[in-house]
Image (cartoon, helix red, strand yellow):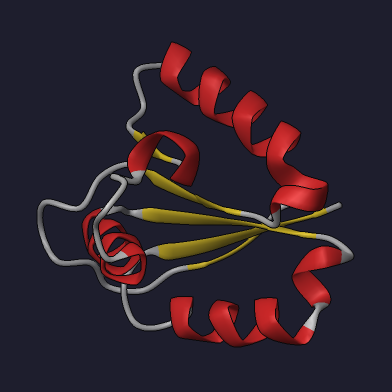
Amino acid sequence: MLHSTTSSLPPGRSGVFLSYARADGEKFATDLRLRLEAEHILVWQDRIGMEGGQNWWRQITEALDRVEFLVLRTGLETCQPAALDAGHALLRPGPRLAEVPQ
């Protein structure tokens, strides 16, 4: 099931940001990235979008500022307290949210 919410977007936003817990969502995220890229849709996934030696949180927030959609893969690991804290920081005005439960 796919849930989405919409918000007004600044011009120039495009692409999809994939948010997931590696423990139970990495295969899903990688498969989805490959499917979207095959359709020529820009995708940001941490495994390919992050640069070593750079501030990781800034890289994430800058990517979120550029994308139109945020896909949030929820599962057991994303319900842990640390993941929930990070998730709340992601849910700020910006990209449209699509939640994909496990």
Above or below residue 35? Residue 80 is below
Q: Is residue 22 left or right of residue 48?
A: right
Q: Position of residue 26 (x, y in %)?
A: 70, 40
Residue 1: tell me if it is visible: no
Q: Is residue 12 left or right of residue 35?
A: left
Above or below residue 97? Residue 42 is above
Q: Foreground: 55 or 39?
A: 55
Q: Quadrant of residue 87?
A: bottom right
Q: Position of residue 95 (x, y in %)?
A: 36, 64
Q: Quadrant of residue 99?
A: bottom right
Tag count in the figure?
0
Q: Quadrant of residue 40?
A: top left
Above or below residue 97? Residue 26 is above
Q: Residue at x 80, y 79 (%)?
A: 80
- In this view, which residue lies farthest toward the front? 53
- In this view, which residue lies farthest toward the top? 38
Above or below residue 19? Residue 92 is below
Q: Residue at x 48, y 38 (%)?
A: 47
Q: Position of residue 4 (x, y in %)?
A: 58, 63
- In this view, which residue lies farthest toward the left? 11
Residue 2: tell me if it is visible: yes
Q: Position of residue 29 (x, y in %)?
A: 63, 38
Q: Is residue 26 left or right of residue 13?
A: right
